[in-house]
Image (cartoon, rainbow, N blue to C red):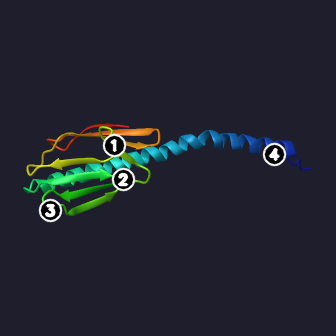
């Protein structure tokens, strides 16, 4: 004769599964946050490299990062050359300012860029060399 599970045994298994899910939920949620911060850092580095290549043609450019987007603007005419959206809920700040603006001269050089990408309590600091455009620091 087959023996079936009792109600108490079934409830015990359900409770253990609920505890396991509750324990893993915050860990799995953090992975998505880190991925969004990494994607935002990648978008900013890509736009910076594009700006430096275009600026070496002699035109000064401005990179503007605010409210979930990064924009490349012609320094003389003010027209937008490229816009990249940052992942949702990522905030970007530099020197306690929510708007990051930096100019890239006609020689492709600028000041060092030092900014913090933030989602809630999680942050990632990105530093880009103004002379070469190389990432000199990316601290998750």
Residue 33 is situated, as x and y percent measured from the top left of the image, at 46, 45
Q: Which of marks 1 and 2 is nearer the N terminus?
A: 2
The Cα–Cα distance between marks 3 and 2, rounded to whole angstroms, is 22 Å
Q: Do the residues labelled 1 and 4 touch (CB within 8 Å)?
A: no
Residue at mark 2? 67
Q: Quadrant of residue 138?
A: top left
Rate crowding at label 3 as few (under 14), some (14 to 19) or many (20 or more) other CA atoms within 10 Å.
few
Residue at mark 4? 10
Residue at mark 1? 93
Residue at 22% from the left image edge and 50% from the top image edge: 48
Q: Which of marks 1 and 3 is nearer the N terminus?
A: 3
The Cα–Cα distance between marks 1 and 3, rounded to whole angstroms, is 26 Å
Residue at mark 3? 77
Could you say which is closer to the camera, residue 29 or residue 106? 106
- State the quadrant of the C terminus: top left
Q: Are marks 3 and 2 in contact (CB under 8 Å)?
A: no
């Amino acid at each position: 004769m087959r023996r079936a599970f009792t109600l108490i045994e079934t409830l015990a298994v359900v409770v253990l599964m609920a505890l396991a899910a509750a324990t893993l939920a915050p860990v799995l949620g953090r992975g998505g946050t880190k991925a969004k911060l990494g994607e935002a850092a990648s978008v900013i580095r890509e736009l910076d490299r594009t700006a430096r290549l275009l600026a070496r043609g002699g035109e000064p450019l401005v990179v503007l990062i605010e409210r979930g987007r990064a924009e490349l603007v012609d320094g003389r005419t003010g027209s937008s050359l490229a816009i990249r959206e940052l992942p949702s809920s990522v905030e970007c700040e530099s020197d306690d300012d929510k708007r990051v603006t930096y100019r890239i001269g006609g020689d492709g050089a600028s000041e060092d860029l030092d900014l913090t990408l933030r989602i809630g309590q999680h942050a990632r600091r990105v530093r880009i060399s103004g002379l070469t455009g190389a990432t000199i620091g990316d601290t998750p």
